[in-house]
Amino acid sequence: MYEEFMRLAAERYSVRRFDGRSVERPVIEKILRAGQLAPTGCNNQPQRILVIDAPESLEKLRRCTKCHFDAPAALLVCHDREACWKRPYDGKLSGDIDASIVATHMMLAAAALGVGTTWVMHFIPEAVRQEFSLPERLEPTALLVMGYPAGDAAPYPGHLTRRELEETVFYNEL
């Protein structure tokens, strides 16, 4: 099981070329269920996810980011500031972290289902808020554009480059 997960994690890459096929709703539902299983602060589940797959919604998305890659679908992952766990001693909200964990679960589930994704952070939050009529309490955190990879889709050239663990992991002190 560990080996299967590691293979999936290693083979998954940000897909920026899609073949144009729609992602079927049952497949999207499976991806969303993986996000539903993600851990969140005190299990408050502050994630709010907008499925963007209708032509008019995809056009709205194009007005919010140049990094849409003409994907046939996207998941806008937000967090509800009023539903987040709040760290008592400094007031930090768990929302960005919770939404990121949810998005990661969904990215890996999508890869397991043959659906390519790219995590897009390069979007204009105010445009997203306006185009999709987001209430003020919702904070857009991540945009997962997704679809079936085109035949010539390939990872970014530096995708396989990884720092040695000794450069990024420290035991007991930095």
Image: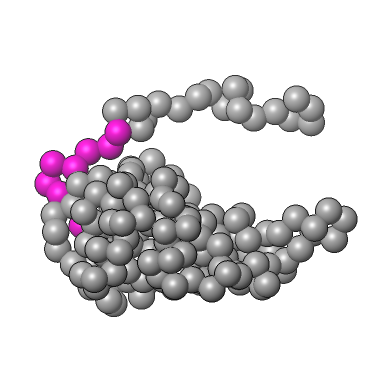
Residue visible at 29% across and 69% down in the picture? 57
Whether 25 is drawn above or below 162: the answer is below
Whether 136 is drawn above or below 169: the answer is below
Q: Main secondary structure of the magenta part?
A: loop
Count how many numbered circles sit on residues in the image.
0
Q: Is residue 60 visible?
A: yes
Query: Percent x, y for residue 9?
Result: 41, 46
The residue nearer to you, when weighing 60 against 172, is: 60
Q: Quadrant of the N terminus?
A: bottom left
Relative placement, left or right, of 67 versus 150 is: right
Which segment is the magenta one? 148-156
Say whether residue 151 is magenta: yes
Query: Percent x, y for residue 164?
Result: 53, 23
Query: Percent x, y for residue 16?
Result: 25, 45
Residue visible at 58% across and 69% down in the picture? 136
- The colouring scheme, among rainbow, by chain, secondary structure or one colour, is one colour
Say whether residue 90 is magenta: no
The residue nearer to you, when weighing 73 against 130, is: 130
Residue 21 sits in quarter: bottom left
Q: Is residue 106 visible?
A: no
Residue visible at 30% across and 64% down in the picture? 60
Q: Quadrant of the C terminus?
A: top right
Relative placement, left or right, of 79 versus 118 is: right
Query: Percent x, y for residue 45?
Result: 61, 71
